[in-house]
Image (cartoon, rainbow, N blue to C red):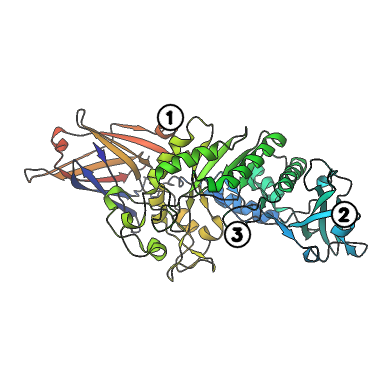
Amino acid sequence: MSLTRVTTATKSKTARRHRAIYRIGGVLGVVLFVMALTQGQTGEVPRASTYPISGYFIASSNIDSKNLQKLQEIQALGGDTVITFGTSLLPAALDALPQDCTIKGENCARVAASGLKVNRYFTFSDGSQWGPPAIKCPRDRHVINEGKAYTVMVFPANDPGCKAKDGKYDVIVAGGSPTSAVDPTVSVAAAASTLGMEFYAGLPAPAKRTDVAYLPDLTYIHTMERFTERFLQYHAAVNDVSGLAGFYHHTEMPVSTSPVYEPVLSLYTMQNGAIHKLLPTRSAIVSPYIEARRDASSIDPAEARGGARKIAQTASGLHLSIAIQDGMGTGKGAAHSASEAKQDVDKFAASIVGKGSWEEKYVAPNRNYFAAAAEGVKGTGADLWANLEGMAPATEANPCDKSLRGQTTVARIERQLQEMASVTKVISYMWDPYYTCDGKVPALKKEMEGGFTVPLVTGSSFDAATGELRVLGFNLRGNSLRISWTGTDGEGHEMEAQPTGIDSAYGKDHGLNPRIQLAVLKMDAGWTNPGDAYVLSAKNTPD
């Protein structure tokens, strides 16, 4: 029989308690997980394990020391991966191009395309200087003026190479950073290389459509393709270091099978193909989102299964990781169990969807979406990750650096993690500001520096034939388990024991999160009565 978990959390100086509700044979049982730190012989509290979040989105800097320090702080919390967002290639009028990009006092784009029929102008401001490594065609120019560097690229609007058969050209003005500034992408890649971490740089993306704001404008997809190639060639020339693991698609879509999102899929396919062609040892990440709100254009887990598979099929030969956003920071997703379905949504979710129960406001809990997506990517070669939204809907109680979203809590993060057993890696949006801001409470990273000390259950099952309780979760090793229950005879029963077995490689061996462990506890025969309610406590003990 399956045991379905629900948790809430309270904090004390030594322990965070997770109250879990289990349904056993139709009768509700209560499970209380208690994790208390105990002192070793030296009187010092042993350092606990790090949180099972191994990657973070970050804002890059053009100062090397700031990037290095940021990555060191992330690594200290167990992170091995950082990701930056990309920059959009934006259409622009000629008179709206940077005024200080000039050649002999004339507009640099006009000079570069002199005598040509210009189809459209574009800007791309990613903090890089670009420069000579990006010069590939006769009309391209590297411009330094008033201490700033620009690169002007002239592409055939509809043809490959440098010459337009139809005579139409698109002109891109990229850069605009001070000549003394460091390329932020190159800087982060260097820091990642120094620390043995992996960095995924944001890809360029088209602007959004004006008629349908959630879809990319593909009216200039040919220029987008040529510019993606030039972007990758530039990084192959100046940024081919061990820390550059791949690239990130910042154009988003839900985990959906709807044909509406075919433009997004075609963009992924094109850019993945370009990466595989020009930097074949690198991979890519895409981060679609859960939309489980009943009052929105919701999708169900079955559609998420097909949506994940369609996204995986855009890989174009490279290795693709699909990091699904869990929606807990935007109110789009729900972290709750079946037993909590009729309970009120928490205050953060209520600020988005209004008051009501989880089942009234959401189609399904996040664990169902991740499990379905895991089935969807089977056999595709893609990895399923989770993008844990490390913020919360903003209220007056949780401001964070004037952001549209607010500061979350460690207890809420732990609840989110319990939904993510089906994924192979957890990354989080976003390190700065959500993990670093000091709001009405200290920054999240300060609390997380104490270590991941709470055992979190992601699932369990009981085999009445063998009397074995099999518990899956994070941080189970080192716990002793105490089970107490009231039998149908009205008598109290209790037992305490170490699990008869801990399989720390269970997650890795079964295609789940590699930090998932299996704890097995042999129960006595009296406990198997499905009418019993029970309380389970788990306590960490020093190694």
CA–CA distance in space, label 2 to label 3: 30 Å
The residue carrying mark 2 is 113
Q: Foreground: 41 or 505? A: 505
Amino acid under disc 1 = Asp
Between marks 2 and 3 in the image, the one whose residue lies nearer the viewer: 3
The residue carrying mark 1 is 509
With 324 as the anchor, is 105 left or right in this view? right
Q: In which quarter of the image is the N terminus?
A: top left
Q: Foreground: 308 or 281? A: 308
Q: In which quarter of the image is the C terminus?
A: top left
Amino acid under disc 2 = Ala
Q: What element carries label 2?
A: loop
Q: Foreground: 494 or 183? A: 183
Which of the 4 image quarters holds residue 348?
bottom left
Residue at the extreme top: 466
Earlier sequence position, callout 2 versus callout 1: 2
Residue, x 34% and y 55% (percent of image)? 14
Residue, x 46% and y 66% (percent of image)? 394
Compared with 105, 138 (above or below) is above
Q: Give x and y (percent) for residue 156.
A: 81, 46
The residue carrying mark 3 is 211
With 21 as the anchor, is 333 left or right in this view? right
